[in-house]
Image: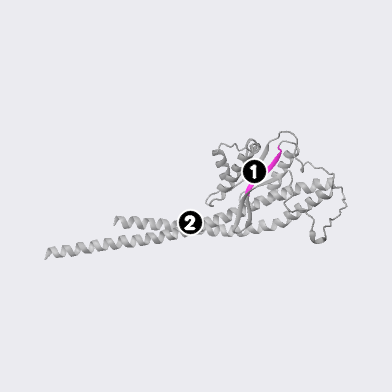
């Protein structure tokens, strides 16, 4: 009986784990729907703003802006690594940290520069790899607010324009679709337009739009460039959140399926053990009855 009781305890434990992972999967699915809506709703605004700034920068020839050029001197780089506070999300955090470490190994300036983190998982792994974390931001959570991101982006803009850092890069998980996400190193500062932005539309016969600036181009860039930086950083946070929920949803579904398979295997094992015990008991009864004859 001892063996069958042990298997029955394991079956009960696996059943409890299955219920927990199924619940976590349902919660992640619910959060994913809301996070996906937030991430996809902000992308058109961010893309349009970047395209506008790129076209403005091309049209305003001879206009220089501190956010468009690298500061002089040997200022260090600043790297922001966005991970999650919680685990149980598959390779999500490890992929981001691996990308961050690869970037730092390839760029000594980034390795020797200032490293900031969002999320406990990334901070712990970087400290384990003996990388000093200058700042750990805990104010964002699962639902980053634009006001918090705006303050952080404003701080980065001030440091960059003051010459304290030569570049600001963000390592995060980029959301491409529900079935595809990839870790990426994004250059936030100095401002660089996305690939294809501001290009001449060939369908219009190769003609460029002519702009008349009011106020002048320098004042417009003073307002639009910081807004573009803040919007891009907010998009990074939104992509990171929705990617985390997808990773947790997939991981918990896999865990639920594995728990179900293990439960079936334990049930077969329990039935065999129980059948063996019944056969042994019947044999003992028959042998005892035969001995009494």
Q: Is residue 137 visible?
A: no
Position above or below: 282 against 165 = below
Q: Position of residue 280 (x, y in %)?
A: 24, 61
Magenta-drawn stretch, dominant element (helix, strand or loop): strand
Q: Residue 95 location, x and y as percent?
A: 57, 48
Image mark for residue 225: none
Which residue corresponds to mark 2? 255
Disc 1 and disc 2: Cα gap in Å? 31 Å
Residue ranking furthest to the left: 293
Residue 117 lies, in percent from the top left, at: 62, 43
> Label 1: how many residues lie within 10 Å, few (<14), some (14-19) or many (20+)?
many
Q: Tell me which colouring the rendered structure shows.
A: one colour
Query: Viewed as shown, does residue 10 lie left or right of 279?
Result: right
Q: Quadrant of residue 37?
A: bottom right
Label 1 or label 2, whichever comes before in sequence order: 1
Q: Nearer the viewer, residue 266 or 22?
A: 266
Which residue occupies the foreground of this view, 285 or 213? 213
Mark 2 surroundings within 10 Å by alpha-carbon count, few (fewer than 14), some (14 through 19), many (20 or more): some
> Picture coordinates of residue 23 (x, y %)?
51, 58
**Range of magenta residues:** 165-172
Residue 26, quarter of picture: bottom right
- Is 216 magenta? The answer is no
Q: Quadrant of the C terminus?
A: bottom left
Q: Which residue is located at x 42 percent, y 57 percent?
A: 14
Residue highlighted by disc 1: 80
């Amino acid at each position: 009986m001892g063996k069958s009781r042990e298997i029955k305890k394991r079956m009960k434990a696996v059943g409890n784990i299955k219920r927990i992972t199924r619940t976590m999967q349902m919660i992640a699915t619910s959060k994913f729907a809301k996070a996906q809506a937030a991430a996809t709703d902000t992308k058109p605004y961010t893309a349009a703003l970047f395209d506008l700034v790129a076209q403005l920068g091309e049209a305003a020839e001879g206009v220089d802006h501190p956010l468009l050029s690298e500061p002089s001197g040997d200022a260090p780089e600043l790297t922001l690594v966005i991970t999650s506070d919680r685990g149980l999300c598959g390779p999500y955090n490890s992929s981001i940290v691996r990308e961050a470490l690869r970037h730092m190994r390839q760029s000594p300036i980034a390795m020797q520069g200032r490293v900031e983190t969002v999320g406990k998982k990334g901070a712990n792994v970087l400290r384990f790899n003996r990388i000093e974390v200058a700042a750990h931001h805990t104010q964002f959570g699962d639902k980053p607010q634009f006001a918090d991101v705006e303050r952080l982006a404003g701080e980065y803009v001030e440091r960059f324009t003051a010459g304290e850092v030569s570049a600001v890069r963000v390592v995060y998980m980029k959301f491409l679709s529900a079935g595809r996400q990839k870790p990426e190193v994004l250059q936030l500062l100095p401002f660089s337009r996305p690939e294809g932005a501001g290009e001449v539309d060939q369908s219009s016969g190769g003609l460029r739009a002519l702009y008349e600036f009011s106020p002048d181009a320098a004042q417009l860039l003073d307002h639009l460039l910081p807004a573009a930086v803040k919007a891009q950083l907010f998009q990074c946070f939104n992509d990171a959140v929705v990617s985390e929920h997808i990773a947790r949803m997939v991981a918990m579904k896999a865990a639920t399926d594995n728990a179900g398979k293990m439960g079936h295997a334990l049930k077969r094992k329990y039935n065999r053990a129980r059948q063996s015990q019944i056969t042994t008991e019947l044999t003992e009864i028959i042998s005892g009855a035969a001995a009494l004859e």
